[in-house]
Image (cartoon, grey):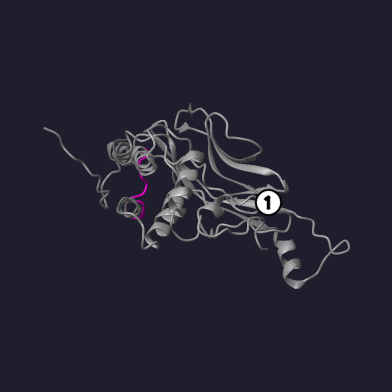
Amino acid sequence: MQNYAEPLFSKGRVLKRESLEVLRDFPGSLARLGLADWSDGILFGFDIHYRIGNKELEKKETGSRESGGRESGNGEVVIDAGAVWYQGQVMLTKKESIPFRAYEQQITVCLRVYPGVSTEDFYIRQLELRLKNGEPGKAEFELGRFRLSKGARLRKDYQDLRDCRTAFNTLDITQIPYAGPGGVTVSPVLLRMFARMIMENTAAADMDVQFALLCLDHPPVSRECLLRYICRRLGEPFRELSHSEIYERLVRIAGAGGRGVGKQSRKEGPAVF
């Protein structure tokens, strides 16, 4: 026989340690039960945008310039709050701004998780949001990548799937490792974009429509489901695919006889700013 106990914290009652322990243990236990077979990865949040410093923004709006019309170029990358699943724990981060001057360079936005340490009162893991050149390292999760021109805005208003990898001034979300059942999966934003392209194509195959509805209705889509759909749809043997290979095949499927990708060539290059 088991008892389910929920602390009431009624007025006039003595606050008991047992009540606080129940309050402490419940969310962690629930998360571990619900995400037990999920891979480590991103859960929610971590939206990224770039903004110019307030002084420069004011100058830009009024048309004033210093030093012969040149802008100093000081900006910052803003990373919204997010949640990551790592080694059996859900960890939350707060919104953070990082100074940015590395224009015309390939930049990867990463979340680094450090080993945990215990104190008398807390178990602590340091979480570091950072910008780096190159690929994520050990215990790092990619949150997006971009190559920004000075004075440009960082685009996220994608025209189609192929636009997600426009070389300059566009946030690339194709490599983000999202947590999912049975293995890491790709960004739900990417899959919803794919699904809308399929649903807008009146000639789409039934298999494509069914998978598109799954993407719209049930994020995140598991890695096995994604791989089995892609391999069966393209007549390939079932095998592991990298995030880049998954993205390239989704572009191919969405553009096969559909709209936007593959039917018309589109101008590639820097974003309009």
Looking at this view, is 201 or 115 the one in front?
A: 201
Point 25% across, 45% down: residue: 7
Q: Residue at x 57, y 31 (%)?
A: 137
Q: Residue at x 61, y 53 (%)?
A: 170
The residue range painted magenta reads 215-223
Percent x, y of residue 50: 63, 55
- Label 1 element class: loop
Locate residue 273: give its quadrant: bottom right
Would you name the residue on which mark 1 appears? 148
Say if the magenta span includes residue 221: yes
What is the x, y in percent for residue 65? 82, 66
Q: Is residue 25 visible?
A: yes
Q: Is residue 165 magenta?
A: no
Q: Residue furthest left?
A: 1
For residue 217, side relative to residue 249 (left or right) = left
Taking the view exactly as shown, the residue that stands out farthest to the bottom is 62
**Residue at 76% of width from left, 67% of height from top?**
59
196 relative to 131 in the view: left or right: left
Is residue 92 something that shows in the picture? no
Q: Nearer the viewer, residue 62 or 162?
A: 162
Q: Quadrant of residue 14?
A: top left
- Locate the N terminus and report the quarter of the image it occupies: top left
Task: Give the side of residue 49 with respect to residue 91, left or right.
Answer: right
Q: Position of residue 98 (x, y in %)?
A: 64, 47
Q: Residues within 10 Å of mark 1 (few under 14, many from 20)?
A: many
Identity, as a three-letter code, of the amino acid under mark 1: Leu
